[in-house]
Amino acid sequence: MKTLPLALAVLPMILFTNFGSTPLNAAQQDQIFTLQEAIEAAFEHNHQVRIQKIEKTKAENRVTRGNAGQLPTLSLSGDLKWSYSDLELTPGSFFENLITPQQPTNGDDPSGGGVESSSPSSMSSVSYDGVTTTALQAGVGAQYVIFDGFRGRSRYRLLETGSEIAGLQHKNELEKTILDITRQYIEAATLQEATALQKMTLEQSQARYDIVQARREYGQISEQQVLQSLADLKSDSVRYRDLLQRHENAWRNLHSTIGWDQRTVMVLEADVTSGFQPVYEQLLQALKENNTGLAIREQRIRYADNEYQLARSMSIPSVTASAQYGYNYQHASEGQFETQEQLGFTGGLTVSVPLFTGGRNRTERENARESIRQEQLRYEESEQELRTSFDNTWGQYQHFKRQLATERSNRDVYERNFERAQDSFDRGLITGMELRSAQLTLQSARLRISELVLQIRLLETTLLYLSGELL
C-alpha cells in the first residue's frame, strides 16, 4: 500500500519530463548543420565581416594619384555680387592733366604774362548717394603642383599602405570569425552530446525506478531504496531540462554570431575531427611569416615611416602653376566708370618657401619619428604574446591528445563494469545505488571523451589561426 503514494508523486514529474521539453522533430534530426556550413554562413551574414569588407573597399578606392595631390585640378567658378552704397571720388593728377589743357610758356604768351597750371587741390571731390554696383565673374581655372618636396609621393604611399592594412584587417576578421564560430559550434555540440547522454541516463533511471518499485511490492527491498531511486530520477530530470535550456541558449548565440535571423535548432555533426597532423616547427615558422596580426603591425611600421617622410617634406619649398580663362563684368550706376568688361587668360607660378611655422614642422617630424619606434615596440610585443599563446595552445593540445587516449581506454572498463552491474541488478545481486554509481561513472567517461574530441578540434583551429594558415 505504500507504493501507491510514490507512484502518484512521480507521475507528474515523468509527464513533465517527456512532454515539457522541446525535442527535435524527425525533420530536424535528419538535417545536420555542419561546422563548414556554419562558417560559410558567417562569411555571408556576419555583420563585422561585412563592415570590414566595406572598409577594405573604401581604402582601395582612395588609392589614386588624384587623392595624393599628384594630378592637376580643374574647376569652373562663377560669382555674382550686388551692392548699394554712397560713393565719394577725388580725382588725382592723372585726371587733372586730362581735364586741364596744356598752357603756353611765358615767351609765347601774347599778353606777356604766364598762367600757372592748376594744382591737384583745385580738383574738387564728387559725391554720389545710393550707387548700385553689379559685378559678374565666371571662368575655368587649373592648378598643378610642379614640385612639393615629394609630399605627393609620400601621400600616395600612405594611401597604398592604408589599403594593405584594410585588406589585412578584413582577412583577420575572417579568421577571427572562423575561430568564434568554431568555439560556439563546439560549445553547442558539447551541450548536444551532454543532453543526449543525460537523456539516456534519465531513461535508465526511469527503468531502474520501475524495477525497484515492482520489487518493493513483493517486499524484496526496503522503502529507502525506492525513495533513493525516486530522488535519482528527479535529479536526472532536472539535469536534463537544464541541459536542454543551455543547449537552446548556445544555439541562439551561434545564430547571433553567424548574423542571420534563423533560430531553428538543428543537429550538429558529432564527428568534427579534421585529420590535422600539426608539426611544431612548421607551425612556428608559419606564425612568424604568415600571422595576420604581425603582418598588420609590419604595415603600421611602414605607415609611420611614410608619415615621417611626409613630415620631413613640409620644410621643402614648393612650386605651383596656375592658369585661368575667364570673363569679368562690372556695372555701376554712378562713379568713375559706368561699365568694365574683361575677357582673357591669366596664369603664373607660385613659389612657397616655408621660413617659420612656429615650430610645427619640427614637432611633426619628432612625433613621426617617435611613432615609428612606437609601432616597432608594438610589433615586438605582439610577437612575444603570439609566441606565448602558441606554446600554451600547443602544450594544451598535446595534453588533451594524451588524455583522450587514456579516457578511451578507461571507457572500455567503465562499459564492462556497467554491463555487469546492470546484469547483477536485474538478478537482484546489487542495490540500485551500486548500479547508479556504475551508471554515472560511465556517463562521465563518455562525456569527457566527447568534450576532449571537440576541444582538440578547437585547439587545432586555434593553432591554424595563430600560424596564419586558417584561410
Image (cartoon, grey):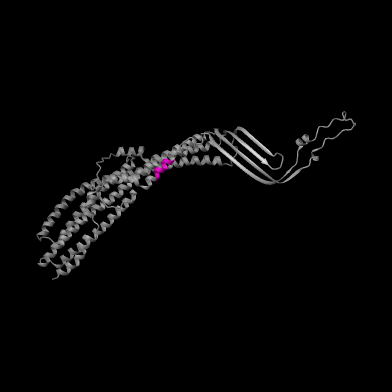
Q: Judge from the rendering whether residue 197 lies leftward or rightward of residue 428; answer left or right.
A: right
Q: In which quarter of the view is residue 350 placed?
A: top right
| The C terminus sits in image quarter | top left
x%, y% of residue 221? 12, 66
Instruction: Give the answer, above or below, for where 370 lies relative to 4.
Output: above
Q: Is residue 35 left or right of residue 137?
A: left
Magenta-drawn stretch, dominant element (helix, strand or loop): helix
- Is residue 440 visible in the rendered image? The answer is no
Q: Where residue 387 appears, x then y in whole percent?
A: 35, 42
Q: As drawn, is 205 to the left or to the right of 377?
A: left
Residue 178 in sight from this viewpoint? yes
Specify the farthest residue to the right.
Answer: 112
Q: Residue at x 28, y 51 (%)?
A: 187
Task: In this rendered view, identify the residue nearer to me: 189 or 309.
Answer: 189
The residue that appears at 33% across and 38% down in the rendered structure is 286
Q: Can residue 310 be found in the magenta stretch? A: no
The image position of residue 246, as x and y in percent, is 28, 56
Q: In which quarter of the image is the N terminus?
A: bottom left
* Percent of width and height locating residue 295: 39, 39
Q: Residue farthest to the bottom?
A: 1
Q: How many labels does the image show?
A: 0
Apparent side of residue 157 relative to residue 131 in the rendered image (left or right): left
Q: In this view, does 98 lie above or below 418?
A: above
Magenta stretch, residue numbers: 51-58
Q: Is residue 56 magenta?
A: yes
Task: Tell which of 125 and 230 is nearer to you.
Answer: 125
Pick the residue in front: 363 or 14: 14
Location of residue 112 (image quadrant) = top right
